[in-house]
Amino acid sequence: NAGVTQTPKFRILKIGQSMTLQCTQDMNHNYMYWYRQDPGMGLKLIYYSVGAGITDKGEVPNGYNVSRSTTEDFPLRLELAAPSQTSVYFCASSPQNPTNEKLFFGSGTQLSVL
Amino acid sequence: GEDVEQSLFLSVREGDSSVINCTYTDSSSTYLYWYKQEPGAGLQLLTYIFSNMDMKQDQRLTVLLNKKDKHLSLRIADTQTGDSAIYFCAESDGGNTGKLIFGQGTTLQVKP
């Protein structure tokens, strides 16, 4: 019963460094999402994917890239880390159009850029 | 664009009822949701309501929807210390991609 697994749980980056946040789900869900959570700001959608090979921008995509080569994995890439990317990042998935299905969330990655 | 607003903090005594309020802007939303986030964890769906309903009850939870005023509320009866968490209101964006628009979250503090 792994569900949605995110790694790492915590990371500190220096300005300009790059890293990949990993997300994998074992529920064969088509829809996957990356959100960032800033204090008092709720969750903002970064990127999403409706199936393998298909990705699209969300509300705050600048500074990030994604890929979806398999149904299971949806990594989020930060190429040149900036302090504004300090946040908690959540990956989520849903079996189909989640308008009437719940999102399954991972436990989050806390990222600090110093 | 779409926007979802919530108050940031609510404090209640154990055993009291809690009411968390939310306003939204997108009248085309089909579903509205309440998610719960416990410390250090991801969000978990608590309940949701279809836009053609006024009320939904699920054990200690009551969701009220006023479409005219675009107002959604979550009432937790007999609030327990285990209910302490952040509660997020969310609306679907009306499209077919499943994107949700989240509010800022309301931190519920339950005092013993």
Image: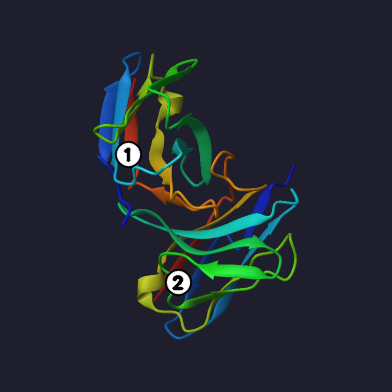
Residue under mark 2: which chain is it in? A
Q: Residues within 10 Å of mark 2 (few under 14, many from 20)?
A: some
- Position in image of residue A79 (x %, y %): 52, 83
Residue B61 in percent (x, y) is at 44, 20
Q: How many marks?
A: 2
Q: Chain of mark 1?
A: B
Quarter of the figure with the C terminus of chain B: top left
Q: Residues within 10 Å of mark 1 (few under 14, many from 20)?
A: many
Mark identifier at residue A61: 2
CA gap between label 2 and label 1 equals 25 Å
Residue drawn at the location 52% of the way across and 46% of the way down: B42
The kind of secondary structure element at disc 1 is strand
Q: In front: mark 2 or mark 1? A: 2
Quadrant in the picture for the N terminus of chain B: bottom left
Three-letter residue code for mark 2 = Pro
What amino acid is labelled 1 in the image?
Thr
Q: Label 1, on which residue?
A: B106
Could you say which quadrant of the image residue B63 lies in?
top left
Q: Image height check: is B19 above or below A58?
A: above
Task: From the viewer's perspective, tell me whether residue B38 is left or right of residue B76.
Answer: right
Residue plotted at (38% across, 40% down): B89
Give whichever of A107, B23 is nearer the camera: B23
